[in-house]
Image (cartoon, grey):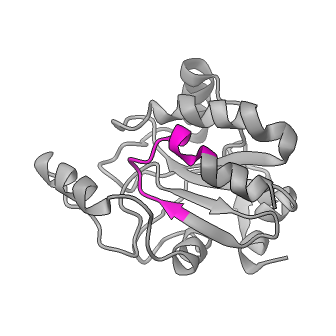
Amino acid sequence: MTAVQEIPVKTIDGKDASLADYAGDVLLVVNVASKCGLTPQYEGLEALQKEYAARGFSVLGFPANDFGGQEPGTEAEIAEFCTTNFGVDFPMFSKVVVTGPDKHPLFKALTEAQPAATGDGDAFRERLKGYGMTPTEAPELLWNFEKFLIARDGTVTSRFVPATTPAELKGAIEAELAK
């Protein structure tokens, strides 16, 4: 078991958990938010879950309110929103902090394992600035819907910028599932 798998987390309904609960599966860990321009990615994430779950894959959603206050709800409100609006059936976890000195140990470990994200982070930073937002600097997560791909053995293999759509991840997911 890897250190990332041993980090305690809580499910969205408050139960103790860890990524070790998914040992042997390929995982896509995503920091999510309900009031973000990227929120429609929930639909694509659920599609990935449905397409690949039988082959040992799972999306794991971690709500975070770090960026523009775009996840202000309670766990119950977040769960209701995701189910009602996007039919989310993949595992969701309690709200966490994903940047700064108070970041959750899971996201600290993920960013240490993969300090740079694949994709055009500079273009996304410029888009954020155009909206009057102040983007973070690497290795911090850039925004909501940043994605980390974890191999069956628990190693963090890839990190993708928020603008990377779930459909664009299929090749990377299939490559990990084939191992």
- Quarter of the N terminus within the rendering: bottom right
Which stretch did the figure color magenta? 159-170
**Residue 109 left/right relative to 37:** right
Indicate yes or no whether the magenta region holds residue 173: no
**Residue 65 left/right relative to 56:** left
Q: Nearer the viewer, residue 178 or 92?
A: 178
Residue under the point 46% across and 42% down: 33
- Residue 58 percent coordinates (x, y): 74, 46
Indicate yes or no whether the magenta region holds residue 165: yes
Q: Quadrant of residue 117?
A: bottom left
- Residue 149 percent coordinates (x, y): 63, 60
- Quarter of the C terminus within the rendering: bottom right
Q: Nearer the viewer, residue 71 or 115?
A: 115
- Residue 160 percent coordinates (x, y): 48, 58
**Residue 134 left/right relative to 12:** left
Q: Nearer the viewer, residue 96 or 39?
A: 39
- Residue 82 percent coordinates (x, y): 58, 29
Question: Looking at the picture, does residue 124 appear above or below residue 138?
Answer: above
